[in-house]
């Protein structure tokens, strides 16, 4: 796999991990110490530096509490990490059934014992990582999945996180994610 594809897979993997659960001290330290992204990558470089600074100064327990308060909560979470909440236009849509069919066509399915719906942003990012790194899927197949499941919700989801009054560590996570998703969209549009 070429370095660009490895980096894309790694970014998707990192975002999947950060959105699936709060980072522990080791992950925060790894982000803080990671190499800077080259300046030619535009908007993603400042967002990465901001995330690295946030990780360097983050208290793992405070980040865990933030994650649970913002994304889990008691009852309805203040910010949802489910893509369909940001992309459903009509009440007659059945996106989870369509997503499950798309995943099945890719040879993927939800793990047994998992209660999270497949439209959780962490699952969608992990699917993209898998398509890039494991399946080495054609760019057109990656683009189809991204365009259908991530792109329609990514901006609104990231904005909801960044604009929330209860997110502090996850604000730069959201800005980095949005920058990365915008870079992906621009690259796919060049195909």
Image (cartoon, grey):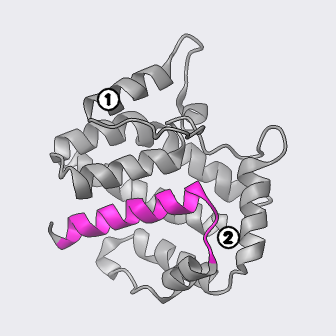
- CA gap, disc 2 to disc 1? 35 Å
Residue drawn at the location 55% of the way across and 40% of the way down: 114
Q: Secondary structure at mark 1?
A: helix
Observer able to see residue 37 = yes
Q: Is residue 118 left or right of residue 41?
A: right
Looking at the rendering, the stretch of residues picked out in magenta corresponds to: 3-24
Q: Residues within 10 Å of mark 2 (few under 14, many from 20)?
A: many
> Which badge, 2 or 1, is on the more N-terminal residue?
1
Residue 140 got which mark?
Answer: none
Above-or-below relation of 39 to 43: below
Q: Residue 175 occupies which quadrant of the picture?
A: bottom right
Report the residue that reaches farthest toward the right.
74
- Does 6 lie within the magenta span? yes
- In the rendered structure, are the residues bearing label 2 and label 1 in contact, judged by CB atoms less than 8 Å apart? no
Q: Is residue 56 left or right of residue 87?
A: right
Q: Residue 140 occupies which quadrant of the picture?
A: top left
Number of numbered discs overlaid on the protein picture:
2
Residue on which disc 2 sits: 169
The quarter of the image holding the N terminus is bottom left
Q: Position of residue 50 (x, y in %)?
A: 56, 78
Q: Is residue 158 above or below residue 61?
A: above
Please, what secondary structure does the residue beneath circle 2 have?
loop
What residue is rendered at 77% in x and 46% in y? 78
Does residue 70 show up magenta in the picture? no
Disc 1: which residue: 104
Judged by depth in the image, the label closer to the viewer, 2 or 1, is 1
Q: Residue at x 45, y 20 (%)?
A: 97
User: How far across and how far down the image is residue 40, in percent?
Assistant: 29, 77
Percent of width and height locating residue 56: 61, 86
Looking at the image, can residue 50 be seen?
no
């Amino acid at each position: 796999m070429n370095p660009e594809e490895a980096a894309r897979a790694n970014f998707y993997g990192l975002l999947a991990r950060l959105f699936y659960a709060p980072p522990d001290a080791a992950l925060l330290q790894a982000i803080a110490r990671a190499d800077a992204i080259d300046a030619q990558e535009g908007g993603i470089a400042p967002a990465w530096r901001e995330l690295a600074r946030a990780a360097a100064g983050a208290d793992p327990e405070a980040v865990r509490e933030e994650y649970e308060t913002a994304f889990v909560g008691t009852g309805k979470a203040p910010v949802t990490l489910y893509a369909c909440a940001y992309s459903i236009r009509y009440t007659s849509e059945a996106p989870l059934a369509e997503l499950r069919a798309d995943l099945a066509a890719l040879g993927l399915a939800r793990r047994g014992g998992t209660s999270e719906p497949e439209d959780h942003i962490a699952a969608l990012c992990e699917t993209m990582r898998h398509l890039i790194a494991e399946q080495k899927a054609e760019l057109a197949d990656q683009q189809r999945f991204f365009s259908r499941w991530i792109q329609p919700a990514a901006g609104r989801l990231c904005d909801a996180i960044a604009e929330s009054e209860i997110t502090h560590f996850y604000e730069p996570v959201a800005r980095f994610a949005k920058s990365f998703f915008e870079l992906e969209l621009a690259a796919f549009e060049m195909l």
